[in-house]
């Protein structure tokens, strides 16, 4: 059968969609013809999308449905149905898993895959090709006789090495803009799952609470292929907690060192899951940068978001990372339901104290399926269903249309807007007291944010709007500080 897999994000040109890649590999492995439509690479052009859809003439379209791109996913499904009414549309991804009934209520959606899609999609295509029923396929929800059927959950894939490798030939690798230290980089999936329960996070049933790894040998093979085929020697690991299994991390690094891979790579982990031994091994194996999720500088808020970290653990982690020589990124989340003016300022001040190379301030957003979403429902709060606004980076948010979704008895929406506008600037200005080295860090941080926006959008106009906004926010920050 002919299959079109769709990544709806129109502005994300950084890395290929590995989830669709593994599904494509499984389908190709069974003899199906697969094409991938990545709207980021096509710059969101509906005209180009329509051309690809017509050329592919798909029997089945599999569409990744994340919350911020859900509206675009529906639009593309409508275009596909308009051109090929008999094409079966299958939605997967976190949004479809969290709000399955709502998604299936849409006329342009036929089937939802809940959880990992590699085996499920193969079984769906077998059933469609042979005129069989979907009733025996685990992890599937579908329409039947005017109602919705939810089949039992599919168990997680225990041995990830059984999945065929990413079909890189289906992606226009040269058009992706991921980079590390200014060098081209690609993403690598080396593990799935996260055992933690941070209230703002929802990764869907495809992730699971148990971390499963590809074997170090399989990861090495994938990296060797990319390096030899495309001449790329920089890699970003998508593991949620890279160092959770330190034996695995040591084994992978030992392979990199033994094979003299001469690569650079980065990853993310947690402040309580690192030690000097594993970090030095990672450094020796080519790791140049590490990101830690900090979220808040308030002990009270850290407990409330179930981060299971203390400020002392975070301080110690950044001290260790700086001493060993990693480039560090810290992420912070502003506007948690427990935040006050004081706790948000405490977060900004804590960012200055731990002094990462890059500080990223996100907006607390109750994504469907997350504990935060359920908290809203329990409080009788109905978050906005304008899914396109479910962005978390402040420079992606239209603050004039920013709508509060929490009880704001502790923090007014005007206060929240103010902090979102000024947090990054306050953090960067705080570096001025740290001498020339910190000032350079601050300038590089802002430049890299601008690069991120431009590389993701390839839009000089959008970059220009960001520069104007930063300038206005800087003036706003100075006026606000002087008035206080």
Image (spheres, grey):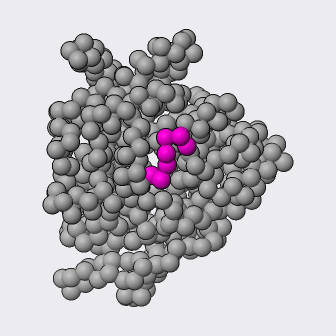
Query: Which one is in front, 251 or 162?
Result: 251
Magenta-colored stretch includes residue 312: yes
Q: Tally the numbered discs.
A: 0
Residue at position x 71%, y 47% from top? 278
Q: Quadrant of residue 106?
A: bottom left
Residue at position x 39%, y 30% from top? 348
Residue 212 in the image: state x and y as whole percent.
60, 65
Is the C terminus in the top left, top right, bottom left or bottom right quadrant? top left
Tell whether 156 sits left or right of 360: right
Tell whether 319 sits left or right of 306: right
Residue 150 in the image: state x and y as whole percent.
32, 81
Is the N terminus in the top left, top right, bottom left or bottom right quadrant? bottom left
Tell whether 34 sits left or right of 135: right
Q: Which residues are magenta?
A: 307-314
Residue 402 in the image: state x and y as whole percent.
19, 39
Q: Quadrant of residue 347?
A: top left
Residue at position x 52%, y 15% from top? 434
Above or below: residue 68 compared with residue 378: above
Residue at position x 46%, y 73% from top? 121
* Residue 68 appears in view: yes
Tell whether 189 sits left or right of 443: right
Magenta-colored stretch includes residue 119: no
Query: Which one is in front, 365 or 385?
Result: 365
Residue 478 in the image: state x and y as whole percent.
28, 14
């Amino acid at each position: 059968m002919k299959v079109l897999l769709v990544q709806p994000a129109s502005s994300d040109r950084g890395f290929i969609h590995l989830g669709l890649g593994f599904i494509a590999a499984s389908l190709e492995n069974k003899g199906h013809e697969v094409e991938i439509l990545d709207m980021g690479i096509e710059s969101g052009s509906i005209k180009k999308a329509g051309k690809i859809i017509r050329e592919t003439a798909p029997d089945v379209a599999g569409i990744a449905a994340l919350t911020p791109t859900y509206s675009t996913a529906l639009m593309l499904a409508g275009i596909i149905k308009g051109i090929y009414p008999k094409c079966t549309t299958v939605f997967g991804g976190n949004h479809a898993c969290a709000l399955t009934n709502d998604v299936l209520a849409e006329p342009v959606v036929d089937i939802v895959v809940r959880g990992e899609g590699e085996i499920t999609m193969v079984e769906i295509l077998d059933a469609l090709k042979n005129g069989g029923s979907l009733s025996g396929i685990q992890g599937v929800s579908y329409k039947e006789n005017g109602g919705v059927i939810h089949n039992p959950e599919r168990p997680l894939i225990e041995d990830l090495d059984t999945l065929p490798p990413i079909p890189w030939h289906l992606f226009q690798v040269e058009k992706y803009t991921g980079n590390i230290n200014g060098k081209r980089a690609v993403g690598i999936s080396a593990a799935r799952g996260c055992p933690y329960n941070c209230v703002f996070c929802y990764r869907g049933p495809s992730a699971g609470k148990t971390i499963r790894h590809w074997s170090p040998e399989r990861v090495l093979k994938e990296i060797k292929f990319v390096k030899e085929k495309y001449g790329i020697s920089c890699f970003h690991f998508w593991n949620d907690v890279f160092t959770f299994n330190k034996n695995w991390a040591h084994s992978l690094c030992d392979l990199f060192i033994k094979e003299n891979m001469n690569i650079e790579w980065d990853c993310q982990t947690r402040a309580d899951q690192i030690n000097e031994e594993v970090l030095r091994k990672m450094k020796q194996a080519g790791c140049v940068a590490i990101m830690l999720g900090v979220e808040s500088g308030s002990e009270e808020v850290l407990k409330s978001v179930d981060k299971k970290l203390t400020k002392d653990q975070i301080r110690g982690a950044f001290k260790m990372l700086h001493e060993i020589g990693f480039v560090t990124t810290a992420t912070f989340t502003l506007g948690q339901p427990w935040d006050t003016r004081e706790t948000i300022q405490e977060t900004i001040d804590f960012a200055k104290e731990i002094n990462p190379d890059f500080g990223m301030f996100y907006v607390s957003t109750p994504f469907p399926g997350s504990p935060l979403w359920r908290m809203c429902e329990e409080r009788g709060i109905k978050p906005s269903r304008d899914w396109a606004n479910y962005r978390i980076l402040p420079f992606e948010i239209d603050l004039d249309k920013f709508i509060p979704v929490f009880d704001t008895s502790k923090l007014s929406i005007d206060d929240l807007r103010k902090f979102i506008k000024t947090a990054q600037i306050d953090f960067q200005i705080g570096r001025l007291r740290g001498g020339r080295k910190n000032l350079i860090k601050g300038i590089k941080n802002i430049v890299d944010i601008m690069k991120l926006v431009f590389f993701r959008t390839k839009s000089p106009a959008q970059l220009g709007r960001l520069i104007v906004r930063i300038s206005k926010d800087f003036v706003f920050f100075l006026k606000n500080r002087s008035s206080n």
